[in-house]
Amino acid sequence: MSRPALAVSALRPRTAPGWRTGLLDSLDAVGAVVLSPVELVGMAVVLLGRMAEFMLLAPFARDRFAFQRLIFARDLGDLLFGPALRVLAICVVLGIAVALVIEQFATGLLSQTGTANLVIVTSLQQIPPFVASGVLAARGALPLAVRLAEMVDRGQIDSMAIMGVDLVMLHAVPRALAVSLASVVHAVLAMVVFGVTTVLSLAGLGLVSTGTFLTALKLLPVYEKISLIGLQLLTASILVVAVALVEGIQGHGEERVDLARVSMVCILKAATVVLLVNLSFALSRMPDLPVLVWR
Amino acid sequence: MRPAAPVDEAAANGLSVEVRGLVVRRGRRRVLDGVSLQLAAGAFLRITGPAGCGKSTLLQTLAGVLDADQGSIRLGGRPAATALAAGQVAAVFQRDSLLPELTVLENLLLPLIAGQHLSRRLAMLRAQVLLAQFGLVDIMHAWPARLSDALRRRALLARVMAVQPQLLLLDDILAGLDSAGRALIGRLLSPPDGRVASIIATSSRVDDFAHEAELLLTLPEGRISPSEPGQEGSGCDTRP
């Protein structure tokens, strides 16, 4: 019977303070900062591999993946319905805000050509994935990090590892899949709500008609970019869950885990990851915009 | 520490434990300092001592969770890693608990299906036997959060017994239980028809497992003093 390697609680030596210890601690801290992106990417690769294993084998090995399927179903339900109201609220507020900005600054310039609609349609590419992955980073990563930290604190990960159960991946793989799927659903929901809210607000302000908006929607290759948006959401989801994993399993032997610290660092890192991923993908889609405005 | 009280090896289940010169450091502090002990297969050793004396560290090292800085551990006459890899050891650590997102039954099935890769049918059969044995049938579909501390502790014990370990390591499993709960868990660990595993249990109370365990190791405050197999004293007090 093959068994995963035993989880080993990291022990950080506590020594009396001194200049050498201080220097080593500083070097340690600098090294940790420098290596943290590498650690994150490494964890994301492991996670991706385990997700692929789960997706490929789960339909055939039903017993082996029974618990992952159970946790996946619960996580997906939780992530689909839990943040839906938040996504709706954020998109309504953003839709009205974008409409007001366009009305204030771009009325004269853009209303004749219908480019206002293009701005809306372009933001449809950028904003909903951002909102969806951002909301799910908070909802998907934070509870996982806190749960893992709690399990480290209680010694559950170690005791289950002795019995051959990898509790970390048991929780992380279904959650990463659930976050990925839920982020796509929420991005679509956000696109609809954001688009409708913005256009209705602009129509209410007498700036554009819904007909010109639909024409502009056809002009911009939103649908051709769906796969890119999907890749963006998948990347953000996996990295965000990897952040939760890295932060959650920072155990120090018998020392009590500081859940507040884990939560704060996790949410800050997850937000940074979401921002960076969305910015890089947004920049990759930007070349379309000037061409369309020029036309 | 002297060898364990005689146990009929042929009849006994469980792994023998042999620890020699175990040293575990945490920073500059030696938590375990040259500990040696021997335990015959099927024996029940209880370890008592004040908080911080190294009870939990000893169990964590035996379980392979912590690495020893020096010394050797043999389980069943083989290096500890062999027994650990074969899944012959199970442990309940001090603050361990059932997974709150799974029911009691699911908690029992988890190590059988995800750890031992048993079929669901076989795992269910084994779980049902243990649920009946531990008096948990009525609450098998309950969430752990809705159970009393004593019931949770019984379910936790049932979970580790489900994997049929040859060596059971229990870290302060009786903490916080009333006398009836303590007595019940003691009886479950040493049933009248014979014990199924060697057991090492720690406790901060001297009277815990007093009736069930054949051996007592009392640790002095601060750390375990070195002792050699066959030597009495040296800071370790054993009483049959």
Image (cartoon, rainbow, N blue to C red):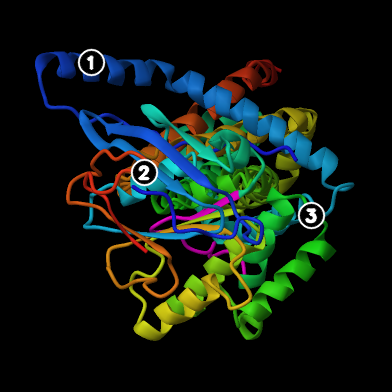
Q: Secondary structure at mark 2?
A: loop
The magenta stretch is: B89-103
Q: Who's the residue at 33% across and 47% down the image? A: B1
Image point 25% across, 52% down: which residue? Answer: B219
Name the residue beneath numbered marker 3: B118
Residue corresponding to mark 1: A24
Q: CA distance from mark 3 to mark 2?
A: 42 Å
Marks 3 and 2: which is nearer the front? 2
Q: Amino acid at mark 3?
A: Leu
Image quadrant occupied by the C terminus of chain B: bottom left
Mark 1 closeness class: few <14, some 14–19, many ≥20 residues within 10 Å: few
Q: Chain of mark 2?
A: B
For residue B239, which numbered disc appears in the image?
none
Q: Position of residue B166 (x, y in %)?
A: 61, 53
Q: Is residue A175 left or right of residue A217?
A: left
Residue hosting label 2: B230
Badge 1 element: helix
- Do residues under tags 3 and 2 come within 8 Å of each other at their CB atoms? no
Location of residue B171 in the rendering, given as x and y in whole percent from the top left corner: 40, 58
Give me the chain letter of mark 1: A
Would you say the magenta stretch is mainly helix, strand or loop?
loop
Q: Is residue A207 visible?
A: no
In the image, A123 versus B92, the foreground residue is B92
Q: Give the mark, 3 or 2, whose residue is nearer the N terminus.
A: 3
Image: B43 above or below A244: below
